[in-house]
Image (cartoon, helix red, strand yellow):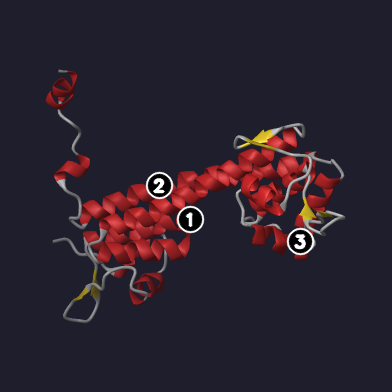
Amino acid sequence: MQYYKPVEIASLLGISTSALRHYESWGVVPAPERAANGYRMYTELHLAYFRCLRAMIPGFGYKITYAVLRCIQQGNMDEALWLAGAEQAGLQEEKAAADQTLALLQDPEVSHIKGRPVSHLMSIGEAAEIAGVQPSAIRHWEKEGLLTPLRNPENGYRMYTAVHLRQILLIRTLRRTVYFLERMKELVEAVEQHSLEKAKEVTEHALGRIHQRNRQQYSGVHQLMELCAQAGLMRPEDTAAPSMSTYQGKER
């Protein structure tokens, strides 16, 4: 069996040896054996863990990456894959929201989103359902000064227009970006004044970041599968392509 010194692993990954020790102490990679002199002896399996860790963090973040690697250490490959899959599904929802935002900004006359009509006046529940957010999120953004809904003069209920819907979608798209509250307010107010060019530019940039995270996630998943193979968790049928006889049998 080939062993690696900490400095060799660190050099391969472009990180410090102290980072290796931190990952080990946090329980996201298995503890290595020790040589007679007490030095750590890393194996190919450890290298696969570290490579997976470094590849997954950009697209999945620390929390999910650490949870996935702990599942692998427990031999629970399926749970690890479902955790990663759920994060990818969440990113797909972010992309759908960004696409909807851009569509509304490019064509203010859009009359349907997700098959639902964009009414002249909508309740908070209707606006939330179309935008794919919780009503509580809309109320929170109102408290932050990002939204100013109309009020029904008869009962005081909140009412939302197509302009409000564009604002809600824009906020949803940008809430995971580095935009600070004051900057967000400027963009939302620009939408209210029908000054849409800057909002379009920012949304397109956010969509570009989503595309980048998607690529990063697939890169991380590739290394995750490499780790599963190195850890002996893959079965032959998990990777083997169907034989020609399989297809021929279906054709009959």
Question: How many C-alpha atoms fall within 10 Å of the one at disc 3: few (<14), some, or many (≥20)?
Answer: few
Label at residue 58: 1
Q: First in sequence: mark 1 or mark 3? A: 1
Question: How many C-alpha atoms fall within 10 Å of the one at disc 2: few (<14), some, or many (≥20)?
Answer: some
Q: Quarter holding the N terminus?
A: bottom left
The image quadrant that residue 38 belongs to is: bottom left
- Secondary-structure class at tag 1: helix
**Residue bearing the label numbered 2:** 219
Q: Is residue 71 visible?
A: yes
Residue 50 position within the rendered picture, expressed as x and y whole percent measured from the top left: 34, 61
Q: Nearer the viewer, residue 100 or 130?
A: 130
For marks 2 and 1, give the CA distance: 10 Å
* Horizontal relation, residue 150 to residue 245: left or right: right
Q: First in sequence: mark 2 or mark 3? A: 3
**Residue bearing the label numbered 3:** 142
- Secondary-structure class at tag 3: helix
Q: Nearer the viewer, residue 32 or 220?
A: 220
The image quadrant that residue 80 belongs to is: bottom left
For marks 1 and 3, give the CA distance: 32 Å
Q: First in sequence: mark 2 or mark 1? A: 1
Question: How many C-alpha atoms fall within 10 Å of the one at disc 1: few (<14), some, or many (≥20)?
Answer: some
Amino acid carrying label 1: it is: Pro
Identify the residue at image location x=64%, y=49%. 173
Question: Dots 2 and 1: beta carbons under 8 Å?
Answer: yes
Q: Quarter holding the C terminus?
A: top left
* Horizontal relation, residue 217 to residue 124: left or right: left
Identify the residue at image location x=22%, y=51%. 229
Residue 154 position within the rendered picture, expressed as x and y whole percent measured from the top left: 85, 56
Question: Dots 1 and 3: beta carbons under 8 Å?
Answer: no
